């Protein structure tokens, strides 16, 4: 029996259950035992309800929180950046100068910002699984699953008028119906200057020590009046303290903690290197465009910001996968899990899932260039055209047969985006469309069906010019008309971009069908089988991969050792002024105009940023950090470099979440931005 | 002829001549062409003479500079630390509290500090080489070389009364007679508090950004009056500026830039790992001792400081050798040099030198434990006893037959050390002697002749206790009497430590003779042959390894990229107060009492520390940094971590010299230490 004795020991070390401060937990399944043992904390139902209702999802990709009873929402400047960019003009640059509404009347409506608050959740796993015929083919099972999800969402929406999303958790181990209250009248209250929010620029991005006031405030309105917040975080008097237990609630976008080694290798060898290559090309193209003058530079700014951010993030992820530790740990954990799965009769059939997932990776490699280079999404106009062509075709289908994004429950949000009056810059559109087309031509070759359809034998530059200069889609009114006119209107439209998008649509549909049937459905099913095996062995004390839905993570405020020295748990305004002076106030280490002007007003020992061991990832930007009393102590805005590999695995050693300190926010509001009334609203008793 | 065409190209890349800001140059051989091309600078004779005469060697292992006409010398606090420690008592702790002479009468004599200023140099290569019979054995040649050097030194001393050292440069390619003016009445003027000087402690050691006021001032006296400085550096008004050309003069102790790959491997595999092991043991022993109370902690402090410093330095050196770049570069450079040497008929005989040096390494490995573990030098009393026993025997020999350190020209300095009244702490002595003996026993085993002689069958603890508790050598008077009584007095002495040292002396002499004849003489001769081959191929535009003699390096003030961000070229007082506040003023990141008390007086934007590309190493501590106008702009006190591998190879990418900024020194003197008159003396027109 020696071999049976050895096995559990191997498993104990090689497939560890969740340890330390790991985990992006759903609110119905917190690691109660760990919280109790490690931090002597037990959340109450009220505490959890407040955390849920005070947490806000920014539907364009971030998080935030209610911080007063009057609908005041705080988030990051970089989450607000898209709106700020759309609200700015060549006359008034809110990104550069900041935005400061000192009276309610000055609060300015955002063009297309949607906020969501999670009002309820409901386990619908049984219903979804009951709709699937386990004996059918993978593709059929996948279709059945999607259809049932779509029916559930529609029923819920019809019944409650709340945004209703069925969320797949644990790789398909669980399905939850999430109902959101949706807010679309959102007004800008305050935004820091970009130089204060993003101090140190791309150099200091993902770096700690850090000195950013990455903050913006919005207010939610209904019926032209500020809403009463569903719940809100009270502002802490002292802010985050070293070693203190803190929580982060928010909407982490995507993790891949359960990927198999073979899937990770695909990331390492294909996906991430290709993304980096594409980003480098786009960054160069946008820099070229920016160099045309100050107004082009302003227009391209948030795209460049996003690209540089992603570039550094993917570089960190790739470094994690290429480093010696991560893959070795994943490989031994997978080997142990495989051994244990094989040894457990009830799970043995799951062993084949590894091989099926490996086969999927082979297929992905075979059509990798098709997947990567058959799109023109860097041009907003082209993306709108393709979306309209698809929209009118999809909505004619029964709800449960449509592409996910065209289901009834998503149409409101989709139209909100599609008809947005946010400005479109034809020169930038043309520049980026030309880039997409050139790149596709170079990667796919002139004989490729996509290239033939997209270029029709012409060169990318003239195609891009012809399309952008002659389309009418810059006007939201035309988009409305086409959508209202439905399939017929789109079919007879002579708008060149619509004509062009019609030509590409069949190719898109073929590729998407292939991807959904051959790749996604297999990954979902086999991933689900492996996830089940993993649960059977590790028990239920685990958490699902991130899905841009509400999660809670816990951790503590803590510095770490780096090289031979220590990185402190926080920085102060002293450090901001040191870094500027040390670099002779040269870009990107120059102070913002107001930071410079009001330096003498600032209490320099006030903390500005701090770090915690919380498990977070992209999508958590803007998340509240709060203490055991539910008080607001900080504003998540970044992770550090060692934290970039958190997409694949958690580590407490040096990976850290980076936040603006609540005391720094107040000091910035009162002393630098002279927004005393806003600070008073935050600290109102 | 293709192979001949290829060769020079290979050499060009693989055996590069000196590049960039590399080099610790002797003042008679500056890289004039590089300085002209890279910095448009040509030093004049006056400029060089001033740099030489204003540069001071601290004979206990550091550098310094005259900075006023009245004999005022600046150096690092950590160079002054030995004297500060010896001047402190359990009542008055100058290390902790600092030292501030506000009037001349308060300037306090140092117990045993010797300063040297290089007054002249003379090439004596021809005379040394003429004394060597090239046909004799290696051992005989070595003896002839040493004898001639000793004659030259004695002649010079008798003639000039100046300290006269023959310095071997370029691995024996050149011999220079250096004559020093020697100062022994040196008085302490000012020393910062150790917490200000060594802010961040061992954590921040070798780290940048850095925030140290690592400074101390002495004044040189003769005939009880301040001397007129031979020359001095005028204080710069603005201090070091980003990108500026700067020079460092000083006394780099030791580099091994010309080591063969085989020699580097010995360092990597034997020497450095053993040192680190020994240091770890000593650190632990000293920490144990410190834990006995505040006074033991005070007594052990500078030893612990030195150990931690060396530990981190050797760790960095070892990391450099273990890393992928350094050894690969050295290996390919050596292969190319070997190829070129083989191909050049006049040099071909030198090829065998690599093999002979490799054979030496084998011998070193064979007696490695003997060399490492047959000493008890951690006890100052034991070292004094051994030194006295050796002294009386050596001085009876003709000058040129003595061990180097007992030659006439060195006796003054030696006696100055031997008879120093600096305090000796018996409990610490016993603790460290016991450590030495325990370690030797454990490494060599009880049957080893050294162990038999040192322990006589007893255990290390009781031997150490017996020796330390009963010796009279703590009293300098007994040392004087023994030395004055000569061989006879020592032979009949019943002082237990003298008796013990007499027993060990023959073993010491056997090992030293073996080392000098079998190792050092071969390394000198073969190293010399290789050096000559290297010169023949690379030309004369190179510099000798460091020898704790005066050198000049050049470079510029420059930050660098680290990870994904930038490290600035300097720090400011803002940064000091940020780091303290960020760590909640916890040790070792707490402010010194006076930094804390006088914070509001300080102009926080004043630079405190800065970094340069100058090529420096241990021994350069306290070196002046000066600009092209010969103005004092900074005070070298450290290198950064990437700079630790500079012992083996220069790199401009991230290796940096770290200095206190001249403006930071003034700000510290005026605002924190209220030494206005000292600051006035520095800035006097």
Image (cartoon, coloured by chain):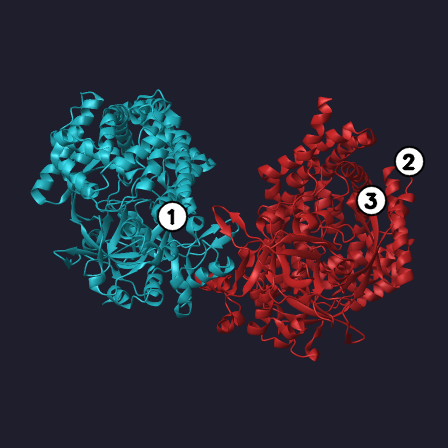
Chain colours: A red, B cyan
Q: Is residue B465 above or below residue A490?
A: above
Label 3 sits on a secondary structure element that is helix
Question: Which residue is more in the foreground, B458 or A617?
Answer: B458
Q: Is residue A152 left or right of residue B592?
A: right
Observer able to see residue B51: no
Foreground tag (1 vs 2): 1
Disc 3 vs disc 2: Cβ atoms closer than 8 Å? no
Q: Which residue is mark 1?
A: B297
Give a yes or no on whether discs 1 and 2 share a subunit. Answer: no
Give the position of the C terminus of chain B as an image quadrant.
bottom left
Q: Which residue is mark 2?
A: A135
Observer able to see residue B70: yes
Give a yes or no on whether discs 1 and 3 share a subunit. Answer: no
Question: Which residue is more in the foreground, B266 or B109?
Answer: B109
Label 1 sits on a secondary structure element that is helix
> Please, which chain is the residue tagged with disc 1 on?
B
Disc 1 vs disc 3: Cβ atoms closer than 8 Å? no
**Marks 1 and 3, how far apart at CA:** 75 Å
Disc 1 vs disc 2: Cβ atoms closer than 8 Å? no
**Of the image marks 3 and 2, the number of the one nearer the N terminus:** 2
């Amino acid at each position: 029996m020696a071999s049976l004795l050895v096995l559990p020991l191997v498993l104990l070390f090689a497939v560890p259950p969740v340890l330390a401060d790991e985990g992006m937990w759903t609110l119905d399944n917190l690691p109660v035992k760990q919280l109790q043992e490690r931090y002597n904390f037990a959340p109450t139902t009220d505490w959890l309800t407040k955390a849920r209702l005070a947490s806000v999802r920014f539907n364009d990709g971030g998080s935030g929180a209610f911080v007063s009873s009057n609908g005041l929402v705080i988030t990051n400047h970089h989450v607000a950046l898209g709106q700020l960019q759309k609200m700015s003009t060549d006359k008034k640059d809110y990104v550069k100068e900041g935005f400061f509404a000192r009276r309610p009347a000055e609060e300015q409506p955002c063009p297309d910002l949607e906020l969501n608050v999670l009002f309820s959740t409901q386990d619908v796993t049984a219903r979804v699984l009951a709709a699937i015929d386990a004996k059918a083919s993978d593709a059929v099972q996948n279709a059945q699953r999607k259809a049932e999800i779509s029916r559930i969402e529609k029923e819920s929406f019809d019944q409650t008028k709340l945004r209703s999303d069925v969320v797949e958790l644990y790789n398909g181990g669980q399905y939850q119906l999430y109902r959101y209250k949706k807010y679309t009248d959102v007004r800008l209250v305050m935004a820091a200057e970009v130089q204060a929010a993003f101090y140190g620029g791309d150099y200091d991005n993902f770096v700690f020590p850090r000195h950013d006031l990455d903050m913006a405030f919005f207010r939610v309105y209904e019926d032209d009046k500020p809403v009463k917040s569903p719940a809100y975080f009270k502002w802490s008097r002292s802010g985050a303290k070293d070693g203190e237990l803190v929580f982060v609630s928010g909407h982490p976008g995507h993790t891949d903690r359960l990927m198999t080694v073979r899937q990770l290798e695909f990331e390492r060898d294909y996906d991430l290197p290709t993304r980096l290559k594409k980003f480098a090309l786009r960054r160069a193209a946008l820099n070229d465009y920016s160099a045309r003058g100050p107004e082009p530079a302003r227009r391209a700014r948030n795209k460049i910001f996003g690209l540089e951010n992603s570039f550094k993030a993917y570089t960190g992820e790739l470094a994690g996968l290429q480093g010696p530790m991560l893959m070795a740990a994943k490989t031994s954990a997978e080997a142990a899990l495989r051994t244990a799965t094989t040894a457990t009769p009830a799970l043995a059939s799951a062993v084949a899932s590894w091989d099926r997932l490996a086969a999927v990776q082979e297929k992905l490699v075979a059509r990798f260039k098709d997947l990567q280079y058959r799109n023109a999404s860097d041009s907003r106009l082209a993306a709108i055209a393709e979306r309209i062509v698809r929209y009118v075709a999809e909505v004619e289908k029964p709800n449960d047969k449509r592409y996910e994004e065209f289901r009834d429950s998503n149409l409101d949000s989709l139209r909100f985006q599609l008809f947005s009056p946010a400005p479109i810059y034809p020169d930038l559109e043309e520049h980026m469309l030309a880039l997409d087309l050139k790149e596709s031509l170079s990667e796919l070759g002139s004989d490729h069906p996509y290239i033939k359809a997209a270029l029709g034998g012409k060169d990318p530059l003239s195609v891009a010019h012809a399309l952008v200069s002659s389309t009418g889609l810059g006007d939201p009114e035309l988009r409305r008309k086409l959508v209202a006119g439905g399939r017929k209107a789109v079919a007879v439209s002579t708008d060149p971009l619509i004509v062009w998008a019609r030509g590409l649509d069949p190719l898109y549909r073929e590729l998407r069908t292939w991807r959904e049937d051959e790749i996604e459905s297999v990954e979902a099913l086999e991933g689900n089988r492996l996830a089940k095996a993993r649960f059977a062995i590790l028990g239920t004390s685990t958490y699902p991969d991130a899905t841009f839905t509400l999660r809670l993570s816990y951790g503590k405020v803590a510095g770490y050792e780096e090289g031979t020295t220590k990185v402190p748990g926080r920085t102060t305004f002293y450090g901001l002024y040191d870094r500027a002076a040390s670099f002779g106030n040269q870009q990107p280490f120059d102070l913002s105009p107001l930071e410079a002007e009001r330096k003498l007003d600032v209490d320099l020992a006030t903390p500005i940023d701090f770090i915690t061991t919380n498990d977070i990832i992209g999508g958590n930007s803007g998340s509240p950090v709060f203490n055991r009393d539910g008080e607001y102590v900080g504003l998540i805005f970044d992770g550090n470099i060692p934290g970039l590999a958190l997409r694949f695995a958690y580590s407490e050693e040096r990976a850290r979440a980076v936040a603006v300190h609540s005391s720094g926010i107040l000091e910035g509001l009162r002393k630098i931005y002279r927004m005393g009334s806003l600070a008073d609203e935050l600290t109102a008793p």
